């Protein structure tokens, strides 16, 4: 997937495009303004047309050839006048020469060029243009009207290109340089207010509800996005709360009929079908307890108290011994003579051991011994639940703690027991792993920090 350009690059290119467009519009407006102010009228045009048409006959007299430009000039200016004077003082006059300029004669022979006219705002006297030019046969002085033809399209285009090259292009280069330097700084400064939002977003935890992204100080352009994310978080929290209430209600509703069904089965005669039904009811009871465990895990921190892992292990072994024996196992309990103190939630840790023992009963092959071992190793209290069944393939030992994972596609169970074990152990800042038992089979090892420093010990 092609990476999208950064906001900095987008702003830079769009600002440069906007500047180019604005400067081009500015140039067009300048050209239109000059045209409206008659700047597009070429003051030297009449002089150039007369210069190109000027000729001298064999007797030295000055005359004008009938050129196309001269015809166009006369059509546009029916009252065209001019006085052309050569170095010898010979003159060629035509048209209604204004009285103000008619008597100039050779008074300005030494002047190369001049504009003759009136003060600004005084339109009683028409202006005139005097210019010394080379006619090909010598220099002449042409005195004529300062009004020429409207500038040709090519000359007007050349003027526009000159304006672009000398004004607009340098200005655009300077603005582009300033934009390239300023845009990253402006973007970085403008997005600085999003740093708290980014930090809060990175700290979002799926297990912790109620978190929202801060909207104070967020730019108006970004606030709708932040508000939409906060709305999504609120909907997530609402859905999570509905799911939590459903799990709690379902678990409580299931416990009563399961207990009644179990009591009725216990009162039945001891038959093979009764034992199988009791096992099925036990699995249903485990599932209901799993739902309650999910509800208890919604708390951000467990209620910790001083506990003895040995006592918890002994209590679980006593409670599940009948179930293990009924399934064809022997249940062994191996613990230290002294306490193994940890800080934890008694009910949650008991559920950890119950889940591990029930898992061993379910998948241990209905033979051999299920062993519960409690010991101290370094600074941890350790509980191991091992069986003598087929074990867990190494490739699946990490996956067995994932929710809804099953080693066999059609095996019974909800696939949440070991996931709950891992979550509870993590809440107690401990670790759980699946390994091989010494005599073959699966072994689950739970390590929890000791409540007080103890030396190394062996069980």
Image (cartoon, rainbow, N blue to C red):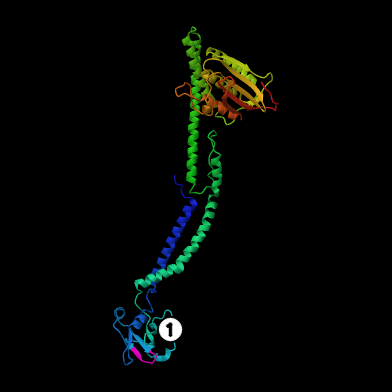
Instruction: In this rendered view, identify the residue nearer to me: 156 or 41.
Output: 156
Residue at the far top: name it: 269
The residue at the point 69 percent across, 23 percent down is 457
The residue at the point 43 percent across, 65 percent down is 26
Q: Report if residue 91 lies within the magenta region.
A: yes
Q: Report if residue 218 lies within the magenta region.
A: no
What residue does disc 1 label?
114
**356 up-or-down from 166: above or below:** above
Find the magenta span and give its range: 86-92
**Left or right: 357 with respect to 1?**
right
The residue at the point 49 percent across, 11 percent down is 275
Where residue 313 sits, quadrant-wise, is top right
Where residue 372 sits, quadrant-wise, is top right
Instruction: In this rendered view, identify the residue nearer to me: 108 or 215.
Output: 108
Label 1 crowd bin: few (<14), some (14–19), many (20+), radius 10 Å? few
Please indicate, yes or no, whether residue 141 appears anywhere in the rendered image: yes
Please indicate, yes or no, whether residue 308 appears anywhere in the rendered image: no
Question: How many numbered marks appear?
Answer: 1
**Left or right: 199 with respect to 48?**
right
Q: Looking at the picture, how far across and down is residue 335, in whole percent?
A: 65, 19
Q: Looking at the picture, how far across and down is residue 18, in whole percent?
A: 44, 58
Q: Looking at the picture, how far across and down is residue 209, in whole percent?
A: 53, 34
């Amino acid at each position: 997937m092609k990476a999208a350009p950064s906001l900095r690059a987008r702003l830079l290119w769009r600002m440069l495009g906007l500047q180019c467009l604005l400067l081009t519009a500015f140039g067009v407006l300048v050209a239109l303004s000059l045209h409206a102010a008659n700047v597009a009228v070429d003051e030297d045009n009449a002089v150039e047309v007369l210069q190109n048409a000027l000729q001298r006959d064999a007797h030295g007299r000055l005359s004008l050839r009938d050129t196309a430009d001269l015809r166009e000039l006369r059509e546009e200016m029916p009252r065209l006048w001019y006085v052309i004077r050569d170095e010898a003082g010979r003159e060629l006059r035509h048209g209604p020469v204004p009285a103000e300029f008619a008597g100039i004669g050779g008074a300005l022979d030494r002047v190369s060029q001049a504009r003759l006219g009136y003060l600004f705002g005084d339109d009683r006297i028409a202006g005139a243009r005097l210019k010394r030019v080379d006619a090909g046969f010598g220099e002449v002085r042409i005195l004529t009207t300062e009004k020429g033809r409207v500038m040709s399209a090519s000359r007007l285009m050349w003027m526009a290109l000159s304006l672009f090259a000398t004004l607009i292009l340098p200005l655009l280069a300077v603005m582009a340089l300033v934009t390239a330097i300023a845009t990253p700084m402006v973007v970085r400064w403008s997005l600085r207010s999003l740093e708290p939002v980014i930090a809060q977003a990175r700290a979002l935890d799926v297990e912790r509800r109620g978190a929202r992204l801060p909207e104070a100080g967020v730019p108006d352009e970004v606030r709708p996005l932040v508000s939409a994310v906060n709305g999504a978080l609120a909907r997530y929290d609402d859905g999570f709360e509905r799911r939590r209430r459903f799990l709690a209600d379902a678990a409580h509703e299931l416990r009563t009929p399961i207990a009644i069904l179990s009591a009725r089965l216990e009162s039945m005669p001891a038959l093979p079908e009764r034992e199988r039904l009791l096992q099925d009811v036990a699995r249903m009871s485990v599932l209901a307890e799993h739902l309650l465990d999910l509800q208890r895990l919604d708390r951000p921190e467990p209620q910790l108290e001083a506990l003895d892992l040995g006592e918890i292990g002994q209590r679980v072994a006593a409670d599940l011994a009948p179930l293990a024996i009924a399934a064809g196992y022997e249940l062994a309990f191996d613990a230290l003579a002294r306490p193994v103190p940890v800080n934890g939630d008694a009910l949650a840790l008991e559920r950890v051991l119950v889940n591990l023992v029930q898992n061993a009963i379910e998948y241990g092959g209905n033979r051999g011994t299920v062993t519960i071992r409690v010991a101290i190793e370094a600074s941890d209290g350790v509980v191991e639940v091992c069986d003598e069944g087929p074990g867990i393939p190494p490739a699946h030992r990490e996956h067995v703690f994932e929710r809804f994972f099953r080693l066999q596609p059609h095996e019974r169970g909800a696939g949440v027991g070991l996931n709950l074990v891992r979550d509870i152990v993590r809440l107690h800042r401990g670790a759980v792993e699946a390994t091989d038992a010494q005599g073959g089979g699966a072994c689950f090892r739970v390590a929890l920090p000791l409540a007080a420093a103890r030396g190394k010990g062996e069980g």
